[in-house]
Every structure is written in structure tokens, then in C-alpha cells.
Amino acid sequence: MNTKASSFLVGAPMPIPTVDPYPAYHKVRKENPIYRVSPTQWVITGYQDAMSLLQNPLCSHWGQDSETQAILFSGKSAVAKTLFAFAPDSGLPYRKNVMHALAGKNLKFDGKAMQEQADKLLDKLVGKEEIDFIRDYAHPLTFETISRIIGIPDEDIPALSTTVAELDGMYLGLIYNPVATGAGGLFLSFLRTFIEHKKANPGDDLCSALIDACRREEEDESFILSMLILLFYAGHDNMMNFLGNAILALDKHQAEQATLREQPARAYDCVDELLRYDSPVQFFLLFAKAPIQLGPKTIAAGSQILICVGAANRDPSVFTNPDGLDLTRKPAHLSYGTGAYRCIGARLAHLQAGTALSKFIARTTAYTPVQGGTVWRTAPYVQRGPAAVKLHVSWNPAL
Ligand code: HEM
């Protein structure tokens, strides 16, 4: 494998419009679904091709091996090491550990607690004609959930949530910059003290489980810190982006929103279609371990292969009317990934997403985006979600 090759993840492989990338995806898929950007860089936009590569043993996954990691994170080996710790075949206990902690029966922060938490946030917003859906609802709700699962004391969460809002999703930077200043520095310093406290006072929480596993693997505090940051990133950022994307999708599809308003609890059944329609994760990176024949094209060994999840999720050969939102659809989307690497927080994500949306829909009678009030994150392009969504809101007087 050519370890000198620059990674696709550094810059977008093709022009990707921030507000609506989907017309560009359709164009690439139609004209060149197995798109060779350079002799060793490819972009895949069709669903079947994406699935076949994701399941192909000749492909290694971006979290999988040290060569891959060297290309992706040269000079940032702490990120590589942390991601590798979650690889299914790393032989390390962390993936299993986190999966265990997030399994339904072990989840202390359950659906009822999430509903109460959503209600508490909405109680504070009722009566305001304008809110920022991300700042006032999606961010605090999803940050509190992952914080409680990790074991952050309740009384520390509000201040920590305010600090983390300033990071604007740039969690991973803290793994390779553990001397960050500003909000990043405050967050790191809080987590260091928190780890020390948990070491001395273990509890029934995810941080204590990680500390225990790290002790057995003889890992030090800096590794525990990186693992916690990755968990915040995985659990908070994707959830927040999902909620922002979903609320905008429901605004664009008023008839679908109206059916949801008749029965807001149906939101749980709509999460997969909302994930298909606008995924918070838009790309995965694979590496060809050997030459791979894909349709008429041969992908050379050592190539980097970007799977465009957003495009595959709207492939018309798999999804009828792919640009439409159909809340009755049960789509086999790729937004959580697939196979051994599939998101280990998917069950938790589903519960949070359904709870957050059903509560917001039930407690409002209508919402309208404020003109110019939606700001899309522009980096990194692998992720998709708005940093701000200002809404005019009509509150439900009955609730
Ligand atoms: C809608 C929300 C979410 C989406 C779309 C999502 C998506 C993903 C994706 C695409 C992956 C990587 C799959 C791959 O590399 O092939 C992943 C991995 C992971 N997810 Fe999620 N996820 C979500 C929520 C969560 C939540 C709530 C947690 C809770 C902690 C979580 C924890 C993880 C972890 C620990 C990993 C493995 C490490 C990593 O690859 O970053 N995810 N998720």
C-alpha cells in the first residue's frame, strides 16, 4: 500500500455544495458511478457497488489496520490508535465494552428519562417565538444523554454543555491536540479531573467500564481521555446533526410533517427514512488490499475508495422517488454503516432520535425556518449537519 498517498479525507474529492449536495451526487452517479478521481482514488455513488465494496474482504476499512491509519492520520497517531481500539477485529476489549454499556438492558438513561429531559428543555422554550433548534434543543439534549451515559455528574452537565457548544463539533482535534486552549482546554481539563475521580470512585457508567478495560490493557490516562473524546464525538455530534437535518427535511415535506403531527409517537418509526434522506455521515473510506474488479473497472491495489453514503441512500435503482421523504418507507440505508463496523450506538441513536422528534412535534403546532437562519457546517465534509437552525415556532397550548 502506498503510505505516501494523501488521504481523500483531507479535501473533498469533487465539488460538494454545502446546502444541497444531492443534485451533484445524482449527476456523478448517472455519469460515472465508479468515479476514478486519480489512478488510486475512487468515489462510489451507487448503492449496490457501495454494499458490495463494504462487504468485500479485499477492502480494508478506515478503522481497521495500521497501514490505513498511517495514511489517514500520519502525525496524529493518537486518533488512529483510538479509532483502531473500536475496530471489531482489533482483539481489544473496547468495542465489546461499549456495546455492552449501550445495550438496552444496561442503559441507565432509558426512554422515559429521555422524554423527561426533552420536556424539561421544551418547558424552558415554550412561549419564545424564535428559537435556534440546534443551540436550544438538539445540542443540549444530545450532549446531556451521552454525558449521563458516560457518567458525568448531573450538576456538571449544563456548564460543560455550554463549553462544548463552543467547540462546534471539533472533538477529534482534541485527541491530537491535548494541550488545546479555550473551550477545548476547559473540556480537556474537566475530563482529566473527571477521570481521576472515576478511578477513585468507579460507578455503573461507561467511563468506569472504560477505565477498567484500560487498566487491564495497561493503557494510561491519555488513552482513556482519547476514548472519552471519541465517545462524545460519536454520541453527540452525529445525533445533533441528525436532528438538524431531520427538522429541515420535515419542513421541506409539509404533507409528511402533517401526518407525523397527527401521531407524534410515530416519529420512532420514521427515524430510518430521515436517516436515509439526509445522513449525518456522508462518506466512508475503504482501501483496496488487492486489485478489485467492480463492474467494468479495475480498482488497483492500494487505492483509496470513498463510499458516498448520501448518494447511495438516494440511488433510484433501489429507492423509489429517492429525493422524496416517505415516512412509511422502511429503507435499508447506509447511514450507520453496515456489517462488522456498523455503528454500535445505533439502538441508542434510534431511541434518542425518536424521543427528541416526537416531543418537539407534539409540543409545537408549526415551525418555520427564519430566512437566513440556517447555517451549514462546512468542515469536515464527511459530516453533514447545520450549526444553527433558527425557527419561528407556534407552541401547542394543550401541552
Ligand atoms: C444518528 C446518529 C448516529 C449515526 C448516523 C451514526 C453513524 C455511525 C457510523 C457511520 C459509524 C462508523 C461506521 C463505519 O465506520 O463503517 C459509527 C460508529 C460508531 N458509533 Fe455511531 N452514529 C450515530 C449515533 C451514535 C451514538 C448515539 C453513539 C453512542 C455512543 C454512537 C457510537 C458509535 C461508536 C462508539 C462507533 C465506533 C467508533 C467510530 O467509528 O467512530 N453512535 N456511527
Image (cartoon, grey):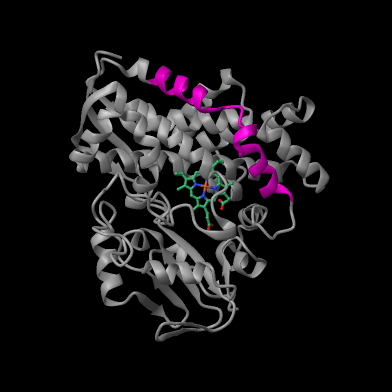
**On screen, residue 166 above or below 71:** above
Q: Nearer the viewer, residue 335 or 263?
A: 263
Task: Look at the image and give the residue range highlighted in magenta.
Answer: 93-121
Q: What secondary structure is the stretch in magenta mostly built from?
A: helix
The quadrant in which the C terminus is found is top left
Q: Position of residue 300 (x, y in %)?
A: 51, 84
Q: Residue at x 68, y 34 (%)?
A: 207
Q: Is residue 2 left or right of residue 272?
A: right
**On screen, residue 214 above or below 306:** above
Q: Is residue 97 left or right of residue 31?
A: right
Q: Position of residue 162 (x, y in %)?
A: 46, 27
Q: Residue at x 61, y 64 (%)?
A: 69
The quadrant in which the N terminus is found is bottom right
For residue 75, what is the image quadrant? bottom right
Q: Nearer the viewer, residue 128 or 205?
A: 205
For residue 231, what is the image quadrant? top right
Q: Residue at x 46, y 63 (%)?
A: 10
**On screen, residue 324 above or below 253:** below
Q: Residue at x 48, y 52 (%)?
A: 336
**On screen, residue 264 above or below 343:** above
Q: Is residue 85 visible?
A: yes
Q: Position of residue 85 (x, y in %)?
A: 68, 53
> Does 16 appear in magenta?
no
Q: Is residue 135 visible?
A: no
Q: Is residue 9 left or right of residue 33?
A: right
> Does 114 appear in magenta?
yes
